[in-house]
Structures are given as C-alpha cells and as structure tokens.
Amino acid sequence: MEQQTQQVTDDGQLFDKWLGGDPKGFSELYGRYSGRVFGFLLRMTGDREVAEDMLQETFLAAIRNVGQFDRSRSFLSWLFGIAHKRTIDYYRHAKVEADHVDDTDGSVGSKLETPEDSLSNKRLRKLVGEAVQRLEPSQREVFMLRELGGVPFKEIAEMMGCPINTALGRMRLALINMRKELKKRGIDNVQQI
Amino acid sequence: MCNKFEESGLLYVSGELSPVEAREYESHVAVCEECRRETEAYQRERAELYTVDILSERPNPVVDAEILRLGSAARKASTAFMPMLFLKKYAALPIFIMLVMVAVGGYFRYHAMVADKLVAKYGGEATSSSPSDSAAPAAAYPLPVNDEELALSDSNKSASDTNAPFSKTRGNMNLEGVVTVKESVNEPGK
C-alpha cells in the first residue's frame, strides 16, 4: 500500500513535469504505463493493429483532457478509465465481439508474440494470454482492469455502471474460468509452471 | 458454499479493506477452509501468473515513437500559447472598458462635429471647445460680467451691433444654446 502511495506521488511529479512543458514527464509516464494499457487493449480487442490505434487514441485523449485528472486518484486508474471507454466504443460501434471470439480461437499466441521474450516467459505469456482471451468479455474486462490496471473494485464498478458486488462476482468467475483454461493447457497450479 | 471470499476475500487480497474489515476476514479464514484455499490460490496466482510482466504487451516501436512525438508536441504547443491564454483570461475586461471609452468618445466627437457643421451652415462661424479657437472672438466681444452690464450690452447690441458673429435671430435655427455654450467656454479666458 505504501509502495502504491509512493508510486502515485511519483506519478504526480511526472505529471507536473509534463504540465510544465517538460517532455520527459510525458515520456516517463508513457514508458511506465503504455505496456499495461496496451496489454489491456490487446486482450480486449484481440487485434494488435486495432489495439495500437486505440493506444494512440487513449494517450491523445489523456493529453486533451489532462485538466480533468483528479490528483486524489491513481494516474494509472485514470488512464485505464480512458482506455476502457475506447473498448466500449469499439464493441458498440464495430459490433465485432462475435467475430472477435471466432477469430481468436487457436490463433491468439501468434498475434500477441513479441520477439524479445525469453523462452519460458514467452510460453507463459502465450498460455495466460490464451486463457484470458477465452474469458467472457465482462469477466475479462474486470480481470484485466484489476490485475493489469490495478483499478480498485469500487472504480471498476463505476466504470462498468454496475454494483460492486456484480464486479466482484465477475472477478470470481474470471478466476475460476482462468484456472480451468490454464488446466487445459497443462498448468494445474502455479507450482507446475 | 461460502461467499465470503467473493464478498471480502477479493478485496482483502487487493488491499481494499479497512484494517478492521481485514482483521474480520482473517478471523473468518482461520475457521473456513474453502475461503482459506481460495485466498491462498489467488495470492499465488497474482504473484506468479497475473503479473505486469506476463499480462502487459509492447506496441510496435513506430507507434511508441508517434505517441511520444504527439505528447511532447502537444505540451510544447500549449505552453507556447500560454501568453495568449493569459490574455484571454485576464485582458477581456480592460479591453471591453477601452472599447466602451472609444465608443463614448466617438459619440461626443460626432455630436461636436454635427454642431460645428450646423453652426457653419446657419451661423457663419463654428463653435469650438478649444480655448485657443475661441480666444479671438472673446477678445473682440468682451462678455458682460454683471446684470447692469448685461442690460447695457443688450440694448447696445439691438441698436448698433450688426457685426456680431452670432445673431440669436439669424437663420432658421435658434442658436441661443450654441451662443450660451460659447460664452461659458469663453468666460475663463476673459
């Protein structure tokens, strides 16, 4: 918790640098969080190019609405809130959800691979990525917001427009389904990795 | 089946419970095997599977470079226009007051010009508020300073003063007001 508070403070300092016109403030915040935001967008869309476009839109929206950032909140949660809105627009306007589920069957690993990964990490990322991709979208949403964005459940419920108990219920189902999917892929519990 | 893990266990592992609530949950876990197993499994998964390293992804470096360029350019642009933003924010009132003053000044100037034209057309001499312009007529025709002089002046004017530049009955307009203004302006120079 203390580390999280420290992180928030550092984010605030970088944010002030950025507001003051120092490009290092923005580049450091981007370097710190772009991977997480992109991971979220990639898992939610299943398409690298679409996720890259949405990553750009997310950070441009952050730049445009920089004055709306509430300092009492975590910068990462705010950023994930913006990214989450992009995914809602994506699903709402493109209506790609059904196609996206079909498209991801058995081919997720090849889309998500990055060449610089080490072998074991690469395997693990592939397996976990596949398992995440098999989650029902609302469960995947809560799971990724919580695990990758570190967004508190209360804020997740606000983002999704549901009671906190609903968000918690989806998270529990996500955890149960992740275990099932990982078991199918040979990971029965984390000690066997 | 116990629902305590869903209600509180997830929040406990995420560090979102108050100290009192956290102690309550720990007391529950001590007696509930199902919740204890669920809690331990989730803590293990978070530590070894659901980490930032495993879940995060890197975009194409070209995308990275483009976003960084846009981010830096946007802040530079906004700071470069800081003086304009300051002007927009703080200079509106003074500019408005200045415009009102110009408008009022223009209004009076216009009426002075109209009066001058009317006098030129009907009275033969333009009125002016400038002391230097009115100095010569004031010297040529000294104004009366009291009632007796005023009465004497009126009787003299009606009888013989045909060279006076202003005549209250000349033309179609009553120029009494113009003469009055002229006299009041000339008074200090007397």
Image: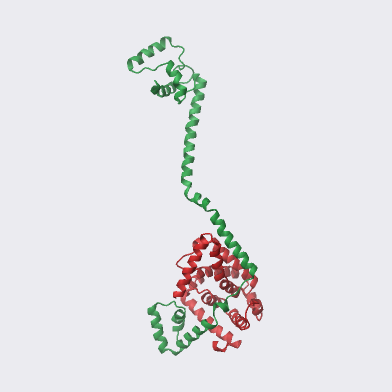
Chain colours: A red, B green
Q: Is residue B46 above or below residue A32?
A: below
Residue B1 visible to an observer of this rendering: no
Give the residue drawn at x 50%, y 23%.
Answer: B118
Give the residue drawn at x 61%, y 68%.
Answer: B64
Residue A146 visible to an observer of this rendering: yes
Residue B174 falls in which quadrant of the image? top left
Q: Position of residue B189 (x, y in %)?
A: 40, 22
Q: Residue furthest top?
A: B160
Residue A36 falls in which quadrant of the image? bottom right
Q: Which is nearer the eye, A52 or A11?
A: A11
Q: Is residue A15 above or below residue A156?
A: above
Give the residue drawn at x 59%, y 72%.
Answer: A38
For residue B61, side relative to residue A155 (left or right): right
Residue A24 falls in which quadrant of the image? bottom right
Image quadrant where one finds the C terminus of chain B: top left
For residue B147, side relative to residue B90 (left or right): left
Q: Is residue B30 above or below residue B151?
A: below
Q: Position of residue B14 (x, y in %)?
A: 47, 78
Q: Position of residue A191 (x, y in %)?
A: 54, 88
Q: How many marks?
A: 0
Q: Position of residue B23 (x, y in %)?
A: 39, 82
